[in-house]
Amino acid sequence: MLFIPEKGAAMALFSSDPVVAKKEHWTSPQPPHVVLQALTEAFSHHGEKLRHVGPRLEVRLGSRWKFTHLGPFFAQGRANIPLVLVFVTAPSGYGTAITAHAFDTLGFRLGDGSVFGVPEALAWRVEEFLTYAAGVVGVHRPGPAARPAPGPVPGAESLPRQEPRGFQ
C-alpha cells in the first residue's frame, strides 16, 4: 500500500484483484442439466472458452492482450474486455438454484485500475453478459443502461480553445 498524504487515503501500488466482480442468485423452473445445457449452447456460439465440471460452468470471454492494447476507447477494445462468468447450479424444490459470478481478469497492473473509464466499461460488460445469461435460462433481469462514454479529460477546460480552420 502507498499512502498519499494530500489525499488522506492509501492506494494500492500494484494489484491483481478484479476491478469489477458481481455475484447473483437466480432460480429457474428448469432442471439443472437443462439450465447448464442452455448456458453452454448460448455461450459456445460466440467462440468463448468453456469449461464444464459437474454442476459448474466457467465461461472465459474477451482477450486481455487486445483490451490492454486497445483499451476502452475503441469498440474492438471494449468487445474484448477479459471476463470470467461462473455458473453453479443446484437442484431446488421447484427447479434449479443458480449462482452467477462475474469478474474481470485484467491481472497484474499498476494501481487499482480506475483510470480512463475502465471500471465503467467493465461494469457495463458484466451487466450485459449477466442479463444475457439470465435471459437464456428464463430469468427476468433488467439490462444495463446505455453504454458509458469516456468522461472529459481533467483540466481540458483550461486549455486554449482553437477554432476549426475552414477553407477561405
Image (spheres, grey):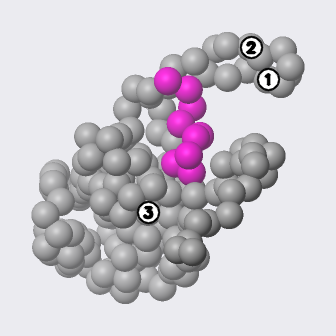
Dominant secondary structure, magenta? loop
Q: Which residue is mark 3?
A: 125
Q: Residue at x 50, y 57 (%)?
A: 121
Question: Does residue 108 appear left or right of residue 163 in this picture?
Answer: left
- At numbered mark 2, what does the secondary structure look like: helix, strand or loop? strand
Q: The N terminus appears in which quarter of the rendering?
A: top right
Amino acid found under the numbered disc labelled 2: Phe
Asked if labels 1 and 2 touch by Cβ distance under 8 angstroms, the answer is yes
Asked if labels 3 and 1 touch by Cβ distance under 8 angstroms, the answer is no
Amino acid found under the numbered disc labelled 1: Ala
Q: Which residues are magenta?
A: 110-118
- Residue 140's x, y, as percent? 48, 85
Question: Does residue 37 appear left or right of residue 136 in this picture?
Answer: left
Question: Does residue 160 appear left or right of residue 153 in this picture?
Answer: right
- Compared to 114, does 145 lie above or below? below
Amino acid found under the numbered disc labelled 3: Arg
Q: Residue at x 67, y 13 (%)?
A: 2
Q: Marks 2 and 1, Cα distance to the nearest angstrom?
A: 6 Å
Question: Does residue 159 appear left or right of residue 57 in this picture?
Answer: right
Which of disc 3 and disc 2 is earlier in sequence? 2
Q: Is residue 51 visible?
A: yes
Q: Which residue is mark 2?
A: 3
Given residues 101 and 97, the one toward you in this image is 101
10 Å neighbourhood of mark 3: few (<14), some, or many (≥20)?
A: many
- Residue 142's x, y, as percent? 55, 81
Q: The C terminus appears in which quarter of the rendering?
A: bottom right
Q: Which residue is mark 1?
A: 9
